[in-house]
Image: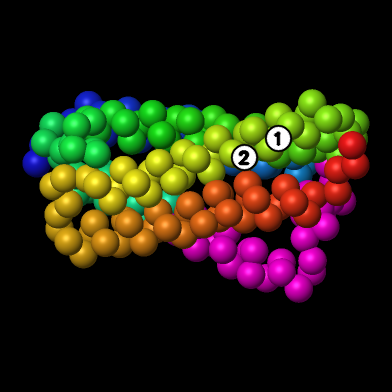
Amino acid sequence: MSWHREKTVLLLINLLAGGSVIGSYIQGFVSHPGKTAALWGNVPASLLPYYTLSMGTAAVGYLVFTAYLVFFVDPGNCKIFGRFPFCLFNWLYAIILVFSALWMPLTFIMLDKPSASLWLTIRFVLAIVGLGSVGFLAAVSTLKPAEPAWAHRSAWIGCIFFAFQTAILDTLVWTALFPFIW
């Protein structure tokens, strides 16, 4: 399998948009010292270790399915959902990472100046990331060819961890426990 342009695009998206996510976190921590605990909202302290563990497994899962796409999938010879080309993965990465970079800045603004429209925007941002991660799970699940089997299975499991964090914990649990009063 030779190197393909779509893999270069995948790596650039991860470098630039992924760097924006990390940059948004660094900027948030630096510009709001001592306020980062407020980002948890009303998530009970008893759940924080599990939430943190899930964040770690989601990050590892992300790295696993990304490595699978980079090292084992031939973009010129794969189909997603039986018909779509590899570039669908690049679109999913771009959507997930761009919207992920918005969460922390928007949440800090929400903590400083709460509003219904901002709260809906944050929920929309998290929903897009969650839907994108479920799209990734479905795309990896239907990828053909799906070889080697162990690497494909590992990528699929990584997607499950990532989708659980983003689609369930972030989109549903965190938003239900964030202290916004209309």
- Labelled disc at residue 75: none
Q: Quadrant of the N terminus?
A: top left
As for residue 44 lying within the magenta part, the answer is: yes
**Main SS category, magenta section:** helix
* Residue 22 quadrant: top right
Q: Does 169 sit above or below residue 98?
A: below
Q: Classify residue 117 as left or right of residue 99.
A: right
The reply to whether callout 1 and callout 2 are in contact (CB within 8 Å) is yes
Range of magenta residues: 32-61
CA distance separating discs 1 and 2: 6 Å
Which color mode does the image show?
rainbow
Q: Nearer the viewer, residue 106 or 134?
A: 134
As for residue 104 lying within the magenta part, the answer is: no
Residue 166: image x %, image y %?
A: 56, 49
The local secondary structure at tag 2 comes to helix
The residue pinned by badge 1 equals: 122
Q: Nearer the viewer, residue 120 or 36?
A: 120
The residue pinned by badge 2 equals: 126
